[in-house]
Image: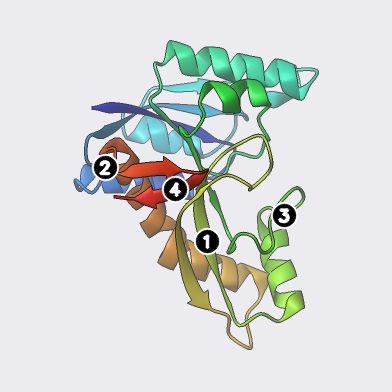
Amino acid sequence: MKNIVVLVSGGGTNLQALIDAEKSGKIKNGKITCVISSKPDAYALERAANNGIPARVIPRREYASSVSYSEAILEALNEEKADLVVLAGFMTILDQCVTKAYAYKIINVHPALIPSFCGEGFYGLKVHEAVLAYGVKVSGATIHFVNEKADAGAIILQGTVNVENDDTPEILQRRIMENVEWKLLPEAVSLFCQDRIEIRDGKAYVK
């Protein structure tokens, strides 16, 4: 059974999707053993408490730099004996001290179809605003491994939704979360925990 540590900063809707998937048996050979929040008031912490999941708060604002904060996160991950780290609405880019120590063991969900609308500055509603401004006809979400570059790690799974003519960023965000993120993130976690993701030449393949 693999230890899954989930990093959060906000409401924790993707965390809830993972909790629900674990409870229903959709996540095989894995268990959420800890939730780590970068903010003490994140609602995701209540979700963890309501489901009996241990939680830790490591406030980003208490650290002078990204490196010192990442070192604190790395220490916590090691203490929790994390086999898999899931970024679920975690709003801090981790230094390479973490990404190298946990190479191909950190999974993130990005609310667009990488390599479009991704990289530094593309997060939350900003992604959906950019999608609508460009006028693309489909969007979606990407589940990918995390490396030292923003949204540049190996892609594990992708899913799409249609962009409707009267969409607002909020409406499109909700459609992508409900139809793609909340389904594919637990699926990718389960695949990892079953050792069904193979890395070849820097690309991820599902076995």
Q: What distance separates the C-alpha of mark 3 from that of mark 4?
A: 23 Å
Residue 109, compared with residue 138, is above or below; it is above
Q: Residue 61 location in percent, x, y?
A: 74, 24
- The secondary structure type at the circle numbered 1 is strand
Residue placed farthest to the right in the image? 64
Cα distance, mark 4 to mark 2?
23 Å
- Residue tagged 1: 141
Marks 3 and 1 sit apart, C-alpha to C-alpha, by: 13 Å
Quarter assignment of residue 10: top right
Task: Identify which residue, 102 or 10, lies in the foreground.
Answer: 102
Tell which circle, 1 or 2, labels the residue nearer the N-terminal end. 2
- Which residue reaches farthest bottom? 165
- Against 143, is 31 above or below? above
Tag in front: 3 or 4: 4
Residue annotated with mark 2: 22
What is the C-alpha distance between the residues marked 3 and 2?
A: 29 Å
Residue at disc 2, secondary structure? helix
Amino acid under label 4?
Answer: Ala
For the residue marked with disc 2, what is the amino acid? Glu
Label located before the other in sequence (4 or 2): 2
- Closest to the camera, between mark 3 and mark 2, is 3
Which amino acid type is shown beneath numbered disc 1?
Ala
- Residue 145 position in % (x across, y down): 51, 42
Name the quarter where the N terminus is drawn.
top left
Instruction: Determine which residue is flagged by label 3.
Output: 122
